[in-house]
Image (cartoon, coloured by chain):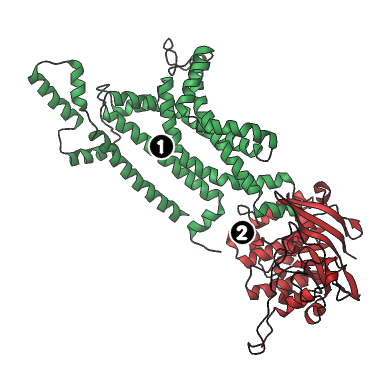
Chain colours: A green, B red
Amino acid sequence: MWRYIGRKLFVYLLTFVIAVTINWMIPRFMPGDPVRSMLNRASISDPEALERMTTYYETVFGLDTPLYQQYFNFWAGLFRGELGVSSMLYPQPVLDIILRSLPYTLALLLPAILLSWIVGNRFGAFAARNKVLDNTVLPVGYILTATPYMWLALLLAWSMGIVLGWFPASGGYSFSLIPEFSWLFISDLISHWFLPFMSLFIVALGGWAIGMRNMIIYELEADYSNYLQALGAPRRLIRRYAFRNAMLPQITGLAVQLGTVIAGALLTEIVFNYPGLGTLILSALNNRDFFVLQGVFLFVVVGVLIANFIIDIIYVLIDPRTRVQMTGGGA
Amino acid sequence: MTLRVNDLKVYYQTLRGDVHALDGVTFDLADGEIMGLAGESGCGKTTLGKSLIRLDSRMKHVGGTIELDGKNVPIADEKAMVPLRYHEISLIPQYAMSALNPTRKIGRMIKDLMKARGVDPASIEDELHRRLELVGLEQDVLNRFPIELSGGMKQRVVMVISTLLNPSLLIADEVTSALDVSTQRAVAESMVEFRDRGFVKSMVFVTHDLSLVYQMADTIMVMYAGHVVEKASAKTIVNEPKHPYTQMLISALPEVGSTEEQGRLEGIPGKPPGLLDPPTGCRFKDRCPLAFSKCSERPPLVEIEPGHWAACWKTG
């Protein structure tokens, strides 16, 4: 068991190092000079002053050193928990900016991913082998899962936010309120959270339900199901077994889907102007603030890696076959 | 008489029409009898085995009756069959290697199954352990997952599970096909022992391995293209078969010590007829060297001597 986890940890660590390296590279090879664009905003006409300010900021951001040294500095900063200083919101540290946005994204993503997965699986299992449900719900599921996240988000924002006016269509909370721990503020937060959450939830739900339905049908045709049927076992027991076995690919699917869901969350946040990481990425891109970009990507990478690692471990706990493989024992 | 099957007809429904897999099968099975059910692939032997316990969704009961211990077996009625299954009629499936749920420990699965069938798991626990020991398995297999067992072990576990409630009739479908020769023998011997100890009253042993059933079965029934061709004691079938098909089937088996000079083994030329639109009369007539005009009528299965039944105009 520990050997398996150790091996997995090593692979994840390697992935982490590579991801961080790419993460460091991309903004540096992107077109546009962040210091220049920051100074452009100040519209300084004196070339000498411009020259001196450029040198000053390059020292502040650590851009005056050779590339390889920047790379090592980046790693060193990482271990001290320093992600640098933002250029668009100078002089705020990147970490503070990200930590401010992170709760919004997590509050969107975690419930959307987990609830859509749980509900979708239950629902798919329920719809399998039920003619009426299968014929009505399945096509809807196919449409939902093929829907782009931001398109559904736009649709929801327009219909329920603007036409019906049930929910606010933009922002994380009303600008008239001051963040505090009160019922008024929390209910306002929730009403702002609802539409972006729903758009993520609905798209993911369709995919899970279809996957589960197909898996259940497959498992109900499996030999062990036939054997139990021949021995007169009730439907309930057979379906319970089928469900448990059908869950295994769904868990793998969850790990695979995580990346897409996060991308979907970025677009959804932008549509709803939700103050999470997605919106942060967009404004960082627009302002060529590659310190913030780097920081956000780092958080996304770490988040996906941690989630995948957890799923790997869960998988081992519930599927005896992976357990046998990893301990190296045979039949 | 344990089992009495009378003119059983079961067809497979396909898009191109009905496949007449069992077309009027009649036979009796006595208490304590192990009957080997032999024939080529596609002759309906597995279909017969399945029909006795559970029709799958494509199978349709067209006619005929089955009686077990004097009671009718309502094979077409899925609900009414449930109380009979496992308690009265049980099955060791063809796919015993994959018959166990891969994500449940075997002991746990047996408990679940017992509870679902209204049997207190504690009441059969000692018996379960005894029977596992009888087939040479340790009690520890109950704490293992199916993947941790070898093919032969899984086969034996399924054997024990299937017979745990002492059914009247056990259908063993190709149980030895996937095993190597030495394991085959062990499995066959355990099956006989299960019968001798009264774990099962009687048994239908579906196989295409005539030499194996010859050693363990009391009687052998040979099927061809959905019809019963001949039924007699195992010795009679192998040593003095009367039906031309059985004769050719037996002569296609090698004998110990035979060499090529003594004559090459003869197969049966031709192939069995398609059952989507089966020929009338005797279904073997196109391949039969003895066929004559009367063979266009279906020969009845008659008792040509006590305990020896055959369906051929030439033997009657």
Q: Residue furthest bottom?
A: B261
**Element class at badge 2:** helix
Up the image or down, A321 lies above or below A253; here it is below
Q: Position of residue A303 (x, y in %)?
A: 41, 37
- Give the Cα distance between marks 2 and 1: 36 Å
Mark 1 falls within which chain?
A
Q: Quadrant of the C terminus of chain A?
A: bottom right
Residue A182 is at least partly visible in this image: no
Mark 2 lies on residue: B146
Up the image or down, B16 lies above or below A286; here it is below
Q: Residue furthest top?
A: A176
Mark 2 falls within which chain?
B
Q: Residues within 10 Å of mark 2 (few under 14, many from 20)?
A: many
Q: Position of residue B307 (x, y in %)?
A: 89, 74
Mark 1 lies on residue: A303
Position of B8 with respect to A56 (left or right) is right
| Residue B37 location, quadrant | bottom right
Q: Which of the numbered marks, if any, corresponds to residue B201? A: none
Q: Residues within 10 Å of mark 1 (few under 14, many from 20)?
A: some
Q: Position of residue B70 (x, y in %)?
A: 92, 59
Q: Amino acid at mark 1?
A: Gly
Q: Amino acid at mark 2?
A: Pro
